[in-house]
Image: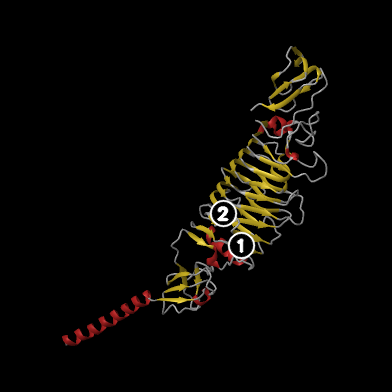
């Protein structure tokens, strides 16, 4: 009897052992298939690990390692990281990197294929997690919008989105619904913190807003975003006068670095700021539009632009926000494209309404073509009225020297010339036959030299033979 019991126990133990060995062997056995479609047909009773060579089985990208998750019976197929097989098994992609790859979801980036579906699936997975979203080198054409709802993230944080270069990793949309590229949140819990986009390009062709951060009604706000080495473009082939390439709505503590924003020359706006606060723009270009940088719609303050490029525009800097405060443009390069419709109405470096004078400073401005130079409005200087179409207030914003400054023509003897530049000027007088120089109607027995005159001061020269003179802003 004892021998029989022992024999039965041994057989039972061997059976359990065989099943265990078989399961261990099956768990270790890894099948290789060509495509994601092939993965859906794998028998999970035979294999628990599968290597997919490429997404479409064409030797391209998007492949990877997958493991069967027997405990998951509810996850939906997202086309990239969770694949539901025909037998109901959930295959989970093994992610060892710090990012989710757009090509895992079937995007080709070949500048021909419509990658809209893959882009939407990628965004849906990326935005709710913590891993970065990676856009490999490629031109991703798509027919719809690129919508990022930060409110879907449990922490209301936008994970990093990065590529291989603003012109190498580029989205090109044919959608006419604006904004085509939109990062937004919701009015419920309106604060959305942190996010970074780097080395990616976004191209649209609309007569309205191409790309936007924040809702236009200011019902959400976004803070601590970094936009680094990105490109935003709007072809605006429809010629929309109000087209905007990049619109920023209620942002705070954000940093834009070496960002290129372009539209269509002489139409619309490259960059529009609406209630942007405590933010800075370092380097980069805001060009090819009617207005390079526009500040409007109330409440933008404590914003700095350092060494930015503004060119091929009619108006370089346009501020019509009566609540704007502490806006500072340091070393901007401004190059006005004269549209041939008259000067100064054709173009001018900046326009700032009189209500904004206390809130804007422009330091060390650099100018390109002759049309860009800052002249005095309405005096005898070389070309009249090139600061803005109707006001003299902008001269008060300039700080420092600027190239291309014009010296006014020397008036007749004893006739005064006012300093209407808004800057302290050094006036040098030499040569000719001079008997006296008048400063603010006070006669001085000088025949030449250098004279410092403040804004509003007047200088006159008494002479029988006209001397030379030169005006230069105080450094």
Identify which residue is drawn at 70% across, 51% down: 263
Q: Splitting the image into 4 quarters, where does residue 352 fall?
A: top right
Pointer 1 local density, CA inside 10 Å: few below 14, some 14–19, many at least 20: many
Quarter of the rendering containing residue 180: bottom right
Residue 451 occupies which quadrant of the picture? top right
Q: Position of residue 254 (x, y in %)?
A: 57, 44
- At horizontal 48% and vertical 73% (from top left) the residue drawn is 52
- SS of the residue at dot 1? strand
In percent of width and height, residue 183 lies at 61, 53
Q: Secondary structure at mark 2?
A: loop
399 or 190, nearer to the observer: 399
Q: Is residue 180 visible?
A: no
Which sits earlier in the primary sequence, circle 1 or circle 2? 1
Q: Where 123 sits versus 447, above or below?
A: below
Task: Say few, some or many: other residues with alpha carbon within 10 Å of mark 2 (under 14 / 14 to 19 / 20 or more).
Answer: many
* Residue 194 tag number: none
Q: Is residue 459 above or below residue 353?
A: above
Marks 1 and 2 in Cβ contact (< 8 Å): no
Task: Name the residue located 36 percent from the left edge and 74 percent from the top edge.
Answer: 28
Residue marked by disc 2? 199
Question: Which residue is disc 1 drawn over?
Answer: 139
Image quadrant holding the C terminus, namely top right
Q: Which of the pair 69/358 is nearer the observer? A: 358
Q: CA distance from mark 1 to mark 2?
A: 13 Å
Q: Position of residue 273 (x, y in %)?
A: 66, 44
Residue 286 visible in the displayed image: yes
Q: Quadrant of the N terminus?
A: bottom left
């Amino acid at each position: 009897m004892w021998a029989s019991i022992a024999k039965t126990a041994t057989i039972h133990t061997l059976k359990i052992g065989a099943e265990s060995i078989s399961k261990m062997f099956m768990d270790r056995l890894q099948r290789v298939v060509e495509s994601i479609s092939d993965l859906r047909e794998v028998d999970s009773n035979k294999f628990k690990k599968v290597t997919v060579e490429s997404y479409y089985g064409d030797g391209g990208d998007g492949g990877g390692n997958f493991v069967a998750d027997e405990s998951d019976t509810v996850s939906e197929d997202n086309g990239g990281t969770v694949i539901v097989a025909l037998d109901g098994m959930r295959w989970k992609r093994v992610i060892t990197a710090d990012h989710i790859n757009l090509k895992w979801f079937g995007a080709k980036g070949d500048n021909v294929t419509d990658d809209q579906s893959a882009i939407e699936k990628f965004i849906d997975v990326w935005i709710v997690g913590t891993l970065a979203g990676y856009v490999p080198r490629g031109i991703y054409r798509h027919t719809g919008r690129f919508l990022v709802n930060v409110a879907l993230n449990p922490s209301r944080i936008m994970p990093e989105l990065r590529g291989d270069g603003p012109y190498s990793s580029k989205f090109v949309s044919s959608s006419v619904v604006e904004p085509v590229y939109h990062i937004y949140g919701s009015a419920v819990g309106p604060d959305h913190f942190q996010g970074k986009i780097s080395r990616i390009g976004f191209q649209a062709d609309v007569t309205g807003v191409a790309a936007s951060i924040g809702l236009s009604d200011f019902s959400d706000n976004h803070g601590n975003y970094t936009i680094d080495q990105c490109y935003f473009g709007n072809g605006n082939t429809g010629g929309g006068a109000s087209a905007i390439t990049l619109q920023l709505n209620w942002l705070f503590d954000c940093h834009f670095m070496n960002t290129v924003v372009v539209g269509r020359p002489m139409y619309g706006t490259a960059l529009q700021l609406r209630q942007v606060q405590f933010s800075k723009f370092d380097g980069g270009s805001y060009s090819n539009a009617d207005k390079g940088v526009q500040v409007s719609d109330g409440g933008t303050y404590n914003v700095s632009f350092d060494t930015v490029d503004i060119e091929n525009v009619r108006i370089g800097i346009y501020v019509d926000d009566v609540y704007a405060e502490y806006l500072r443009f340091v070393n901007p390069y401004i190059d006005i494209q004269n549209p041939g419709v008259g000067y100064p109405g054709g173009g001018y470096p900046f326009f700032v309404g009189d209500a904004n004078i206390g809130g804007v400073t422009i330091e060390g401005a650099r100018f390109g073509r002759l049309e860009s130079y800052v002249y005095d409005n309405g005096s005898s200087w070389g070309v009249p009225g090139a600061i803005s179409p109707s006001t003299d207030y902008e001269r008060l914003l300039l700080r420092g020297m600027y190239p291309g400054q014009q010296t006014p023509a020397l008036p007749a003897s004893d006739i005064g010339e006012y300093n209407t530049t808004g800057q302290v000027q050094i006036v040098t007088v030499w040569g000719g036959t001079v008997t006296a120089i008048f400063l603010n109607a006070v006669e001085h027995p000088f025949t030449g030299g250098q004279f410092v005159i403040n804004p509003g001061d007047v200088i006159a020269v008494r002479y029988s033979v006209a001397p030379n003179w030169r005006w230069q802003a105080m450094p």
